[in-house]
């Protein structure tokens, strides 16, 4: 009834609907003057697997894993919501139980594949928005996942590498 390929294709289709919004927001971010103690940008995805929704946030961070804030109004620091409560998968209610059985059977494989789909999509948005010319180190990941996608080097890293 369900397959990994079908599931990932459906996620890609949902994410594609948000591409233009993300590109426009990233282009705006790239033009902002950041506070001097902002050392990296950390884009974090928060997943609600029961509702198949995600929220994407940007955090301006220092190398001590602390979020940077500023009172200087002409400089940016803090967080920015990129997307709130957007659908990443659509499933008819009668199929929920069967889907969750499928997900439970294949959970580890599916979770990793989901993260790769999200990271690939976000990296493409980042590149289309001009991210390769952006000077701050920039990462994309999932809240509390322990891994991030290093956008400048196009690879997954352990989160501890961001703070080194």
Image (cartoon, rainbow, N blue to C red):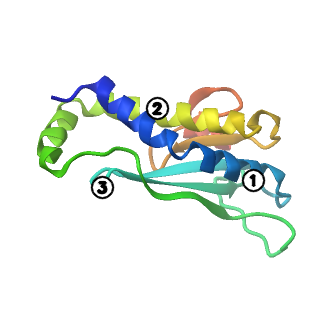
Q: In whole angstroms, how far apart are the C-alphas of marks 1 and 3?
A: 29 Å
**Residues at badges 1 and 3 in contact (C-beta under 8 Å)?**
no
Q: Which residue is labeled 3 in the image?
A: 51
- Element carrying mark 3: loop
Residue at the spot x=31%, y=50% of the render?
49
Q: Secondary structure at mark 1?
A: helix
The residue drawn where x is 75% and y is 48% is 27
Residue 112 appears at what percent x and percent y?
39, 31
Residue 53 on image: x %, y %:
38, 53
Taking the spot 49% from the left edge, 37% from the top edge, the residue there is 118
Q: Is residue 83 visible?
A: yes
Q: Is residue 162 above or below residue 28?
A: above
How far across and how far down the image is residue 140, in percent?
A: 58, 41
Q: Could you tell me which residue is drawn at 63 percent across and 41 percent down?
A: 139
Q: At numbered mark 2, what does the secondary structure look like: helix, strand or loop? A: helix
The reply to whether residue 112 is visible in this rendering is: no
Mark 3 Cα shell of 10 Å, populated few (<14), some (14-19), many (≥20)? some
What label does residue 117 carry, if any?
Answer: 2
Q: Which mark is residue 29?
A: 1
Image location (x, y in percent) of residue 129: 73, 40
- Quarter holding residue 134: top right
Q: Earlier in the sequence, mark 3 or mark 2?
A: 3
């Amino acid at each position: 009834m369900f397959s990994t390929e079908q599931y990932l294709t459906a996620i890609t289709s949902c994410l594609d609907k948000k591409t233009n919004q993300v590109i426009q927001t990233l282009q705006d971010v790239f033009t902002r003057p950041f506070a001097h103690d902002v050392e990296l940008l950390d884009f974090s995805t928060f997943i609600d697997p029961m509702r198949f929704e995600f929220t994407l946030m940007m955090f301006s961070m220092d190398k001590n894993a602390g979020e940077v804030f500023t009172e200087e109004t002409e400089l940016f620091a803090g967080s920015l919501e990129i997307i709130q409560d957007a659908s990443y998968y659509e499933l008819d209610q009668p199929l929920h139980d069967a889907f969750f059985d499928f997900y439970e059977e294949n959970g580890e494989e599916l979770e990793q594949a989901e993260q790769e789909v999200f990271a690939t999509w976000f990296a493409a948005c980042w590149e289309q928005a001009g991210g390769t010319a952006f000077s701050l180190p920039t990462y994309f990941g999932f809240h509390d996942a322990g891994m991030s996608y290093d956008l400048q080097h196009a690879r997954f890293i352990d989160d501890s590498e961001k703070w080194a």
